Amino acid sequence: MKKSIITMMLALAAIAGQAQDVNTCRPIAERILTAAQNHTPDGIDELLAPDFRFANIKQPVAAKVLKQIIAQMPAITGWELAGTEQDSAGLMLRYTIKKPDSTTSEATILFNADNLVLEANLLPGISFGKATPTAKAQPEVSMVCIPMHRYGGLPIVTVTIDGQPCNMFFDSGAPGVILNSKYFNHNINGQVMGSGGHGAVGTGTVSGMHHVKLMDMGGVSLSETDIMTSDLSNLETVGVAVHGILGQSFYKEFDVLFDFKRGEIVLLNPDSTYQWLMNEGYRCQTVSGVKKGHLLAFECEVGGTPVVLAFDSGAQTNLLASDWPQQHPSSVKGIKNDHLIGYGDGRASITKGKTTLTLGGRTFKKLKTAFSDVSFLYEKGIDGLFGCEVLAKQKLLISYKCQELILID
């Protein structure tokens, strides 16, 4: 009898120990999921075990691959802890990941005995052969002027990749760089399969990794870096070959000035921006923003209703919730069904109309606005997007470092 009581007490102690580990590890796991939801991999390293591994990749490259996956994740609307498993390998937390289209996927995070992350699989079915760290473009020059053309209302710039000129959408809504798998094969041993990459133009499927020796845009360059590839053929409905999407990671160290009327984008070293604007004789009005995930959001008004909208150069039209016309009918004119260019989604049917936007005390009238599912933005405290419709009417500068927007005359 005494032996049975001791055995039972030991079993209960083991269960309590596992529960304690779950309570300790769960907030850590959900920090990683929150980072993936917001596309912000900063601060992840401190959560990882020294021997953290990603598939068959070991440190220090494994952490870099995980952070790239986090930066390129598809939209996540939430998650639920689906179960736990504990064995000699450690404690595994299994999550059900919820997506905007109501589908789900599974993520697993394995912890060691010290409650540090030993493995993290955020995308199902991933396998890699090898990977190298992704380089970062730095503002080593004070100013770079990039010629820009518009197709379907969206800005396209020319980027040289391994000596070949390529058309890239300049999409600040995409957290990273994505290459079109139609033109770039995954030339790294192994491949990564799963959904990934989310910008204003939509979501797509990561099909592989392409090693780039040199990627250059007007002297701003990346060298010896691995970049995700995805099928972007649906973006070519704009009537021109689209070799990829130039997301924010390539130029976030710069201040970015959009001048649609001149057909140029200017990258400025943040330390010299104000002096350059003064030398050019511009009159400027600064609007303070707040960083939400990888996006900068600003307090605005649409038809007199206060909203928080994020800036996105890849937003073909302004974007608000699908029920906006019903909730604020007087603020929308000329409602009709149309199509919106969508990365991974083709030319999706969508409701459009025209709205009036007030930003920084300035009013922009008759802006084309799409009304659709914005749950992926609501999760970040954002009501919608503004982009090319405003850029067509107003020269402006976006500063990720200072978290502000400058209206320029």
Image (cartoon, grey):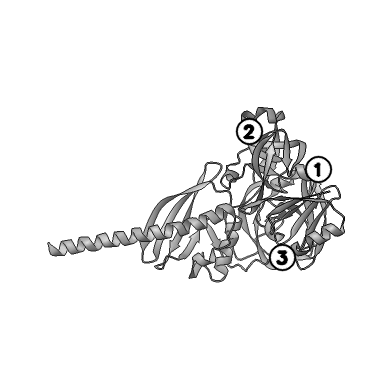
* Any part of residue 165 in sight: no
Q: Amino acid at mark 3?
A: Ala
Residue at x 63% of width, y 65% of height: 188
Relative horizontal placement of residue 321, taking residue 90 as reference (left or right): right
Q: Position of residue 113 (x, y in %)?
A: 39, 67
Q: Is residue 407 above or below residue 108?
A: above
Q: Mark 3 or 2 closer to N-term? A: 3
* Any part of residue 285 in sight: yes
Q: Which residue is mark 2?
A: 324
Q: Mark 2 or 1 closer to N-term? A: 2
Disc 3 and disc 2: Cα gap in Å? 39 Å
Q: Position of residue 335 (x, y in %)?
A: 70, 29
Q: Amino acid at mark 1?
A: Lys
Q: Mark 1 or 3 closer to N-term? A: 3
Q: Which residue is mark 3?
A: 137
Q: Is residue 126 above or below residue 303?
A: below
Please state which of the two labelled residues, at mark 1 or mark 3, is closer to the viewer: 1
Relative horizontal placement of residue 287, taking residue 372 as reference (left or right): right
Residue at x 61% of width, y 32% of height: 323
Q: Nearer the viewer, residue 164 or 260?
A: 260
Q: Secondary structure at mark 3?
A: loop
Disc 1 and disc 3: Cα gap in Å? 29 Å
Rendered-image quadrant of the N terminus: bottom left
Badge 2 density bin: few <14, some 14–19, many ≥20, Cα 10 Å: some
Q: Nearer the viewer, residue 79 or 130?
A: 79
Disc 2 and disc 1: Cα gap in Å? 24 Å
Q: Position of residue 225 (x, y in %)?
A: 67, 66
Q: Position of residue 394 (x, y in %)?
A: 80, 45
Q: Which residue is mark 1?
A: 393
Which quadrant would residue 216 be assigned to in this image?
A: bottom right
